[in-house]
Image (cartoon, grey):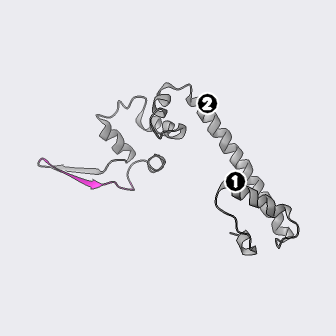
Amino acid sequence: SLLSEFGFIIPKGHSAFKRHIIEILEDGQNSLPDILREHVANAFHLHETLAKKRADLETSLTQHLKHHDACKKLEALEGVGPVNALGLYLSLGANGGNFKNGREASACIGLTPKQHSTGGRVTLLGISKKVGQKKLRSSL
């Protein structure tokens, strides 16, 4: 947004961001002040360093999960990657033995609606945004 103040529009996406920032920083004839150019270069360098560290952490996590049987089984589920497999394993345990059935396990995470039963009548109240594990639910 700071660069847009000087008329530089960068499209969405990591590759477009990287390409345009490099072009802006290398072009000495554009309207970007030199003092700001230095700060943008430092911020871009920090962004690239953090992106590399994130990729290294994801690679390390993937390597560790290859040796964990329960996480390998969870990762075999459709749409479950290494991060979700680890989150499910930490939430549900090795085999989910702490829960009577699948509904209880999914309620623990916050994937099923609240249930209120009285006199044989069952009422489903909707999924609450404040119950369960928000980060795991959103990544699933």
Circle 1 is placed at which residue position?
Answer: 15
Residue 63's disc is 2
Circle 2 sits in a helix, a strand or a loop, which is it?
A: helix
Question: Where does the image place residue 137, in percent across and percent down from the top left?
Answer: 44, 48
Residue located 67% across and 54% down the image: 14
Examine the rendered structure and indicate whether residue 60 appears above or below residue 133. Answer: above
Q: Residues within 10 Å of mark 1 (few under 14, many from 20)?
A: few
Examine the rendered structure and indicate whether residue 128 appears above or below residue 91. Answer: below
Residue located 37% across and 47% down the image: 111
Q: Quadrant of the N terminus?
A: bottom right
Q: Is residue 33 left or right of residue 111?
A: right
Is residue 26 or residue 113 the one in the foreground?
26
Q: Is residue 121 left or right of residue 60?
A: left
Magenta-tinted stretch? 120-130
Q: Amino acid at mark 1?
A: Ser
Question: Where does the image place residue 119, in percent across and percent down from the top left?
Answer: 11, 49
